[in-house]
């Protein structure tokens, strides 16, 4: 098995991003992209905001709130939830790595 990362090109609110993603995580990443894209579009339309960073932060807060308030039993977490959170954190770290050069270009 190769240690070279696979990449997946995704689009969120019309902007393309290249994300490192193993083949077994592809479906989960595409689901996450769909969730984030839909939430960002919903917030952008509702707030009439065109500032992508502001919309992204609001979408992240909304998604986190929905996740946390939807957890049965308050703070009790199942093993699947803990694993999902770990995987999302890993994907976030990969996205940050890929986006770092892009952020310098946006300045």
Image: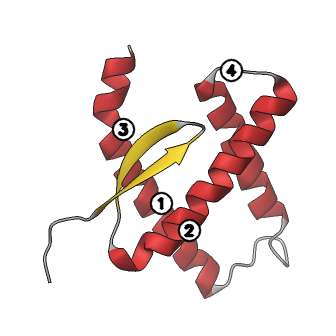
Identify the residue position indicated by label 4 in the image: 50
Q: Of the residues under marks 4 and 2, which one precedes in the sequence?
A: 4
Say which residue appears at 86% left-offset and 31% top-offset: 46
Above or below, 80 relative to 48: below
| Contact? badges 2 and 1 (CB < 8 Å) | yes
Report the side of 70 relative to 30 (left or right): right
Determine the image quadrant of residue 85.
bottom right
The label shown at residue 89 is 1
Report the side of 13 relative to 38 (left or right): left
Circle 4 SS class = loop
Say which residue appears at 76% left-offset and 71% top-offset: 75
Whole-number angstrom distance, CA of label 4 to CA of label 2: 29 Å
Q: Of the residues under marks 3 and 2, which one precedes in the sequence?
A: 2
The reply to whether residue 86 is in sight is: no
Whole-number angstrom distance, CA of label 4 to CA of label 1: 27 Å
The label shown at residue 54 is none
Above or below, 91 relative to 97: below
| Crowd tier of the residue under label 2, counting other residues whose Cα lies within 10 Å: few below 14, some 14–19, many 20 or above | few
Question: Viewer-nearest of labels 4 and 2?
Answer: 4
The label shown at residue 85 is 2
Q: Name the residue at the front extreme.
A: 14
Circle 2 SS class = helix
Circle 3 SS class = helix
Question: Viewer-nearest of labels 3 and 2?
Answer: 3
Above or below, 94 relative to 96: below
Whole-number angstrom distance, CA of label 2 to CA of label 1: 6 Å
| Crowd tier of the residue under label 1, counting other residues whose Cα lies within 10 Å: few below 14, some 14–19, many 20 or above | few
Q: Of the residues under marks 4 and 1, which one precedes in the sequence?
A: 4
Identify the residue position indicated by label 3 in the image: 99
């Amino acid at each position: 098995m190769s240690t070279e990362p696979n990449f997946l090109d995704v689009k969120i609110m019309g902007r393309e991003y290249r994300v490192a993603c193993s083949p077994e995580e592809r479906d989960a990443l595409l689901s996450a992209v769909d969730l984030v894209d839909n939430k960002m579009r919903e917030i952008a339309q509702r707030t009439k905001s065109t500032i992508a960073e502001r919309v992204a932060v609001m979408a992240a807060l909304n998604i986190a709130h929905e996740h946390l308030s939807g957890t049965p039993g308050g703070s009790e977490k199942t093993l699947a939830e803990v694993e999902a959170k770990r995987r999302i954190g890993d994907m976030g770290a990969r996205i940050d790595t890929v986006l770092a050069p892009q952020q310098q270009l946006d300045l």
